[in-house]
Amino acid sequence: MTDHSNIELEVAQLIIDALNLEDIETGDIEPEAPLFREGLGLDSIDALELALAVSKKYGFQLKSDDSNNANIFFSLRSLSSHIENHRTDS
């Protein structure tokens, strides 16, 4: 198991809660593994739900037309890093 930072564990829990992933725990989501397709298996609807949850919890919007979305949502680590750099709730 890979070590998770505090923000990665927090975002992993947000993913689990927002998407109702019942059989997954925060430590099960590998920080560098892809969130979509072959990784966690998320799809575009999941991305929209996750973006909404991030907006509500962290106070900034992830826009659907952002050219960096593929990089932002690539892995738990990349999403957590983006949130940490843009959050307005702390």
Image (cartoon, rainbow, N blue to C red):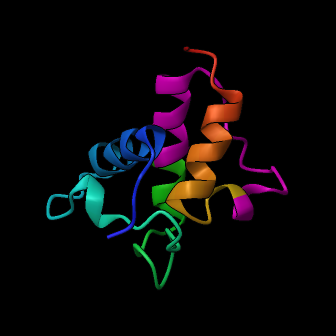
Tally of marks: 0
In the displayed orientation, state which residue is furthest to the right. Answer: 67
Image position of 70 (left or right of 55):
right
Q: Is residue 56 magenta?
A: yes
Q: State the residue at coordinates (59%, 50%).
A: 79
Q: Nearer the viewer, residue 11 or 17?
A: 11
Q: Nearer the viewer, residue 55 or 29?
A: 29
In the displayed orientation, state which residue is furthest to the bottom. Answer: 38
Q: Quadrant of residue 59?
A: top right
Image position of 70 (left or right of 57):
right
Q: Is residue 82 magenta?
A: no
The magenta-colored residue range is 50-71
Q: Quadrant of residue 13?
A: top left
Q: Nearer the viewer, residue 85 or 66?
A: 85
State the image coordinates of residue 55 (x, y, percent, origin top left). 56, 29
State the image coordinates of residue 84 (x, y, percent, origin top left). 62, 34
Q: State the residue at coordinates (31%, 70%).
A: 1
Query: In this picture, is 4 found above or below 57?
Result: below
Query: In this picture, is 1 found above or below 18?
Result: below
State the image coordinates of residue 12 (x, y, percent, origin top left). 37, 49
Q: State the residue at coordinates (55%, 14%).
A: 90
Q: Nearer the viewer, residue 4 or 82?
A: 4
Query: In this picture, is 30 found above or below 3?
Result: below
In the displayed orientation, state which residue is furthest to the left. Answer: 23
Q: State the residue at coordinates (40%, 72%).
A: 40
State the image coordinates of residue 72 (x, y, percent, origin top left). 68, 55
